[in-house]
Image: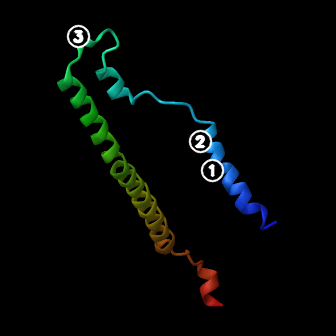
Amino acid sequence: MSRFIPALALSAFLACFALTRPVHACPNCQESISAANADDDDPLRESRAYNQSIYLMAFMPYALLGGLTIVIYRGAKAANRQAELRLSATPVSRPNEEAT
């Protein structure tokens, strides 16, 4: 079985490249490139689109990490609140039980 694992990993790696399709541009870059003709070429518009795409890709990991941190914090806070409620709830003793 251990002989087939490297072969399986290699075939999965090659399948990732074989099953992909070419990508022309990201959405912001694609909008900046004029499809009509070369006379309508605006280098400032194209550079702004590339910059926006780069900023978006650079910001995404921080946004995901921040969102995950908020979810974990809220979950821990709710669990702590429930634990405090369970500890603060003292059982009510009946008068007959105290005498025994």
* Quadrant of the image occupied by residue 29: top left
Real-space Cα separation, disc 1 to disc 2, in angstroms: 7 Å
Per the image, the residue denoted by label 1 is 13
Q: Residue 28 at what x, y percent from top left?
A: 33, 28
Please tell me the numbered disc located at residue 39: 3
Real-space Cα separation, disc 1 to disc 3, in angstroms: 43 Å
Is disc 3 in contact with disc 2, using a CB cutoff of under 8 Å? no
Q: Which amino acid type is shown beneath numbered disc 3?
A: Asp
Per the image, the residue denoted by label 2 is 17
Q: Which amino acid type is shown beneath numbered disc 2?
A: Phe
Q: Residue 22 at what x, y percent from top left?
A: 51, 30
**Classed neighbour count for the residue bearing mark 2: other residues with Cα under 10 Å, few (<14), some (14–19), many (≥20):** few
Give the structural element (helix, strand or loop) at label 1. Answer: helix
- Residue at the image position 60 percent from the left and 86 percent from the top: 98
Name the N-terminal-most of marks 3 and 2. Answer: 2
Is disc 1 in contact with disc 2, using a CB cutoff of under 8 Å? yes
Q: Is residue 5 above or below residue 40?
A: below
